[in-house]
Amino acid sequence: MAACAQIDGMLQGYIDGELKSSDRLLVEQHVGDCATCAMQLRRHQRFNVRMFELHAPYRLARDLAPSIIDHLPDMEHTPIDVAGLNWRAKHPDGLLGRLGEFVPVAAALLLVVLAAVLSYTWPHPAVRSDALGVVTHRQGEYADRLAAATGERSPALLKSFIDAGQRFETGEGTTLMLSVGGPSEIRLNEQTRIVVIDERRIAVEKGQVQLSVGKARRPFEVTTPSGDIRVFGTVFDVRVLADNRTVVTVEDGEVQVEHKEFPSVFRSLLPGQQVDVIPGSAVLNTLQVDVTETMGWARAIVANKDASVLFEEAVLAHSQPSQLTGGGAYFVATQGRPFDSIVLRWKENDALADRCAYNVYVYSGTNKEPLFSGRIPRAALKDPAQHSFVIQNAAAISEYPQIIIVQLVPDFSSGSVETQFEDEFNVVLKPQ
Amino acid sequence: MRIEDAQLVARCLAGDTDAYADLVNQYQSAVFATAFYYVGRYGAAEDVSQESFMAAYRSLQKLKQPESFGPWLKEITCRTAANWLRRHGVRLKNETPLPFRRTLSIEDARAGPRGQVEKKEVFERVQQAIDTLPERYRLTVVLRYLQELSYDEIVSFTGDSREEVRSALQRGSKQLREVLSDLDSSSEGESRWQPALK
């Protein structure tokens, strides 16, 4: 049966009559079995009906077209100065005509001079095309920045720029918000320490951060002492506890969590789910939690307006939009048959490019449970003679799903150039 | 992105006003809802809608991508509404004293004058709640609840993707339900509201 969180995300579409028929059936089947979701659906419906009823008296009550068509203005055309042309044709030597010829030139010159003066005196934000972001919120007294190379400590001031490799640390009663290209927002709770590795990678060393990741097509990666987290555009909360346990809570989107000690242990979280990554334990248990409670602290952190403007003008305007495709998820119909490996194929690669390796995660298409994972090393992708790679199915699977989901995630720490994969995978079935 | 819009725009540019009437029919609900969202009263919203369609017609030759007529019209409507607000000083949204509708529904008649006043108060609270939503959800929520636009209609007007519309409505209405939780009593009939006759 589908998860309640998944159904909850579809209820609005269901009520609005905008779901695909397969999703509609899924919802209907689920609310037939699940009393909580059925009640939720009734409350949703009631609320919607009330909203429609309340708005009804203000709805547009007449057709505007007739009165608009009756009073249509003329379309604007580029005007042609017929009178001026005639006058000049009749008075070829007129003094005014002569002087008149210089008016456009003089006006243009005047404009150029004015523009030059204005642009010289206009206050420019200090453009730092290499900066990763800006500190856009600071509340409290103890927030420090530690320089990348020297570890030298200085206060992390509002509106200051963020460089690669810097560490940020908040003390008691102090919160910070860092806006980085993407655009993504990183909110730091009190007594937190993180490293900004680049604009799509951070490491949380202690404390609690909430991330609102922009929909750039590269994944955003968060490393913690016990787990690695990879996401595309989404909102989630990461908390590193004193015993190096990592707690990840998802508010929006889909978040993939991987256990650092056990690379084969991974999980995909949906909104409202929480997972505990415990050092030494190869089990990732998901819980349903109240997200508003976990993330309440982050809602109080709002970007300073001036700092946001600075961020937009000095950082966002200069950052290159990402052209990368960021891997992707593929569905493979396996029709429940057992298989012992999958083969991934790609188009021809040249050896010179700085290819990045790929992590491959395989999920069951029916319940999104993780099955197994693997990695395509950089060397394989760089070898011009090689066009495919085999990932072995290392999992003991009792019941094979009808469909599997293969997720390809580029690892940009190994290289910067992506590979274009063929849309069709070959799933090699296990010999009977 | 609508191919039909591009064809209609081309016909308008060739002088066919019927084509423009089709565009008005297609988008008047969305334009009206946007105008209402800004100016907050029925009459003014109608004026702003008409003005927006006229302004769009006047500068139709400047439209670079005719298949994006909807999003372009949305920009013009926002600008026209902002100008209206500038001319008329303040936002009148939450002080809507004017009668706004020509006919009473059965429920209105049954509720009597007191019921109507209450309803108006609740409507104002809903508007205030909508104002607290994140900017990117607001217009979508208004388009859906005020004019009951379908997702496709919202997509062609705002230029957002269907997925963005879906998630804006999902999250917007969730937040509204939280803010207006006292309106959502789970025991039907006990609330001071009557369930809607629909």
Image (cartoon, rainbow, N blue to C red):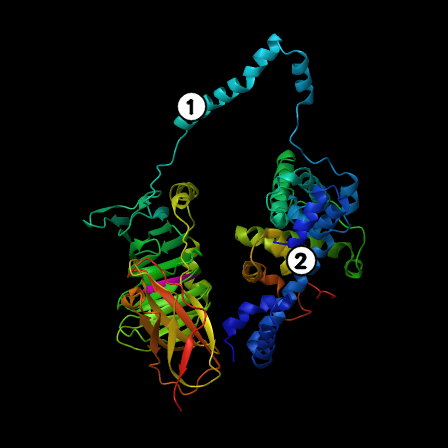
Above or below residue A413? Residue A102 is above
How many numbered marks, from 0 up? 2
Asked if one can make out residue A53 in the rendered structure from this viewpoint, the answer is yes
Residue A384, how many percent across, how many down? Answer: 31, 65
Above or below residue A400? Residue B122 is above
User: Residue flagged by tag 2: what amino acid is it?
Assistant: Leu
Disc marking residue A254: none
Confirm or deny contact between disc 1 and disc 2 (CB under 8 A).
Answer: no
Above or below residue B181? Residue A340 is below
Q: Distance between the residues labelled 1 and 2?
A: 50 Å
The segment highlighted magenta reads: A235-240
Image side of residue B12 versus residue A333, left or right: right
Quadrant, the N terminus of chain B:
bottom right
Which residue is nearer to you in this view: B134 or A190? B134
Tell which tag, 1 or 2, sits nearer the viewer.
1
Residue A295, how many percent across, how many down? Answer: 42, 61
Q: Identify the residue at horizontal 33%, vertical 70% (top origin).
A: A258
B57 magenta-colored: no
Looking at the rendered structure, whether the residues under marks 1 and 2 are on a common chain is answered as: no
Quadrant, the C terminus of chain B:
bottom right
Quarter of the image where one finds residue A14: bottom right
Quarter of the image where one finds residue B82: top right
